[in-house]
Amino acid sequence: MKKKVIIYLAILFSFYASAQTSKIDNSLSKNEVVTVQDVAWGWLNPLRGDKSPAAGKLWGDRTDTLASGFLVKFKKGFSSPPHIHNVTYRGVVITGLLHNDDENAEEMWLPAGSFWQQPAGEAHITAALSNNNMAYIEIQEGPYLVKPTEEAFDNGERPVNVDSSNIVWLNASDITWVTDKSNVQTAFLWGSHAKGDLNASMLKLPVGFNGQIQNLSPNFRAVVIQGTLEHQVSDNKNIHTLEAGSYFGAAQNSTHKISVKNNQEVLVYIRTNGKFVVSTLKNK
């Protein structure tokens, strides 16, 4: 009974966390890697210059009309003026402590591994507390714009703030697409697993993990949130070391070898609109 309750709560939360998941992303992902060291940085809001957080492209183009994912860096003590966005965005904290809420709300500092969703049109502020603050931000459609609160509107969605300590993790034995022997854990974040629907989950890879991800979906994008991952496409000799903030995309029916480096478990955010399989490999 306990297992059934946990699975039910995880699935219920994954549906609650988004009202936009019925949209199908028609863009096709490909085998590609962007290490955090290679990210090109600019200003998230160019009109504010160095008063704005820095933004770095991982995939897509946030100034275009399609979906995109990018990194945002916040300086210590940063606090934005109240504002809205024209599109809903989702964020995962990579480093530091971030607060995202109504300007009159009590501060809720989200640590690394936390997840939040900010609906389009809703007034809010974003603030940062630590010396180094970085998050992965994702939008379903662009362009990503900052607008004054006078233009606020209610699009029917509601904000979500989930501290990393409140994320529900399921064991490999509870998930059909993760092998029982892998000791990999999974957390649902948003979306539906109906055929073709977008969804996102987090994988927790244990220390010493050596395995692979087989992507069976048209759209598969992954961002390392915590730890260090060694990555290699099965038919490619190039091996990449992916630290937190790095990204890799996967073409449909491709296989990606992954292994955890160092003595820290790895968290990987995965956005897809189809199936993928995680399995173990014999140790090197």
Image (tube, rainbow, N blue to C red):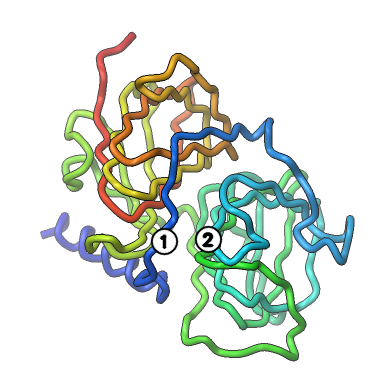
Dot 2 lies on which element?
loop
Please state which amino acid type lies under the numbered disc 2: Ala
Which residue ends up furthest to the left in the rendered image? 1
Q: Is residue 278 above or below residue 109?
A: above
Q: Nearer the viewer, residue 116 or 168?
A: 116
Picture coordinates of residue 222, whole percent (x, y) = 45, 43
Q: The N terminus lies in which quarter of the figure? A: bottom left
- Say above or below: 36 vs 149: above
The answer to whether 255 is drawn above or below residue 169 in the figure is: above
Assess whether mark 1 and mark 2 are in contact (beta carbons under 8 angstroms). Answer: yes
Q: Residue at x 62, y 55 (%)?
A: 61
Q: Residues within 10 Å of mark 1 (few under 14, many from 20)?
A: some
Q: Residue at x 36, y 61 (%)?
A: 198
Q: On the picture, is 198 further left or further right than 73?
A: left
Q: Is residue 29 left or right of residue 171?
A: right
As drawn, the label of residue 25 is 1
Please tell me the numbered disc located at residue 247: none
| Residue 283 image point, x, y percent | 30, 12
Place of residue 90 in the rendered image (x, y in percent of width and height, measured from the top left): 53, 63
The one of 114 and 215 positioned closer to us in this rendering: 215
Disc sitting over residue 67 in the figure: 2
